[in-house]
Amino acid sequence: MKKIISFALLSLVLISCSTKKDILYFQDIKDKPETEIIYTQNKIQVNDILMITVSAINPESALPFNATFYNSGAGTNGGAGINGQNAMILNGYIVNADGNISMPILGNIKVLGKTTIEVEDQIEKILIDQGQLTNPTVIVRVTNGKITILGDIGSPGTYPYIEPNITLLQAIGYAGDLSITGKRNNILIIREKDGKRTYGNIDMRKTDWFKSEYYYIKPNDIIYVYPNGPRVNSAGYITNYTGIVSAFFTALSIYLLFTK
């Protein structure tokens, strides 16, 4: 009987153990030289909300081209209690299914697939070409950037952000890091690009993905962390090893009780 108990306990210990190879990030980092950081510009997508600010030498002449000019009264968007990011979203321009925004006076402007810098230059050119403003300055920001993180991670959910660029590591940090049972070698990223849905797989144990297109997260990316084998096998039964040990000793006690 002692041999059976010893074998069972040893089996539980082995099952509960994970090796460094399974858990540690960036295991090849010591072999990597310094690498150049390549910054990228996100492209505007359908359903993005753009905050556009137009200014000129004469500030009053630029007011009609700003959404806040039209929403500053008693209308819905100008009501009390709306501030910060909510105000930027409510006063922003939604990119419609055709990839256009509709600005006061200027009408429809095609912005799909362009960077915010390209749209700034585009609107400035339109204002000058139409004789609307002299030496205008246009600032464009995407105000509703967000990512969704699911699976075996600390705090799954959808996270907004306002930075022009965030990395995959930052996104995972928002969600509280991978659980100890999350698979480091197969992080799935689902991305919409040029009207198509693409899929990428990242091995967090290595660093070669630092140069991939998935190093920087894009707006509306979905990140999924797969659970490892033991976590999947335990689903629907006992979800932690303390419970397994407790169940084992309970079963053993019942066995000894009826075999005396």
Image (cartoon, rainbow, N blue to C red):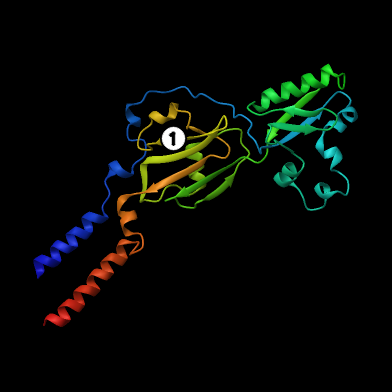
Q: Looking at the image, how many numbered discs can be counted on the residues?
A: 1
Q: Which residue is mark 1?
A: 200
- The quarter of the picture where the N terminus appears is bottom left
Relative side of 105 to 239, left or right: right
Q: Height in image: 211 above or below 153?
A: above
Report the front residue among 177 and 198.
198
Identify the residue shown where x is 47% and y is 32%: 214
Quadrant containing the C terminus is bottom left
SS for callout 1 = strand
Label 1 packing within 10 angstroms: few (<14), some (14-19), many (20+) = some
Q: Is residue 7 left or right of residue 162?
A: left
Residue 172, given in percent of the width and then of the height, sits at: 48, 43
- Rendering quarter of residue 183: top left
Location of residue 113 (image quadrant): top right
Answer with left or right where residue 51 lies relative to residue 171: right
How far across and how far down the image is residue 246, in percent?
Answer: 28, 70
Q: Give the answer, above or below, for where 168 lies relative to 138.
A: below
Left or right of 28: which side holds 212? right
Which residue is rendered at x = 41% and y = 23% of the image? 34
Q: Residue 211: image x %, image y %? A: 44, 26
Q: Residue furthest top?
A: 129
- Look at the picture and state if 155 lies above or below 88: below
- Which quadrant of the figure has residue 115? top right
The residue at the point 82 percent across, 27 percent down is: 106
**Amino acid type, residue under disc 1 in the picture:** Gly
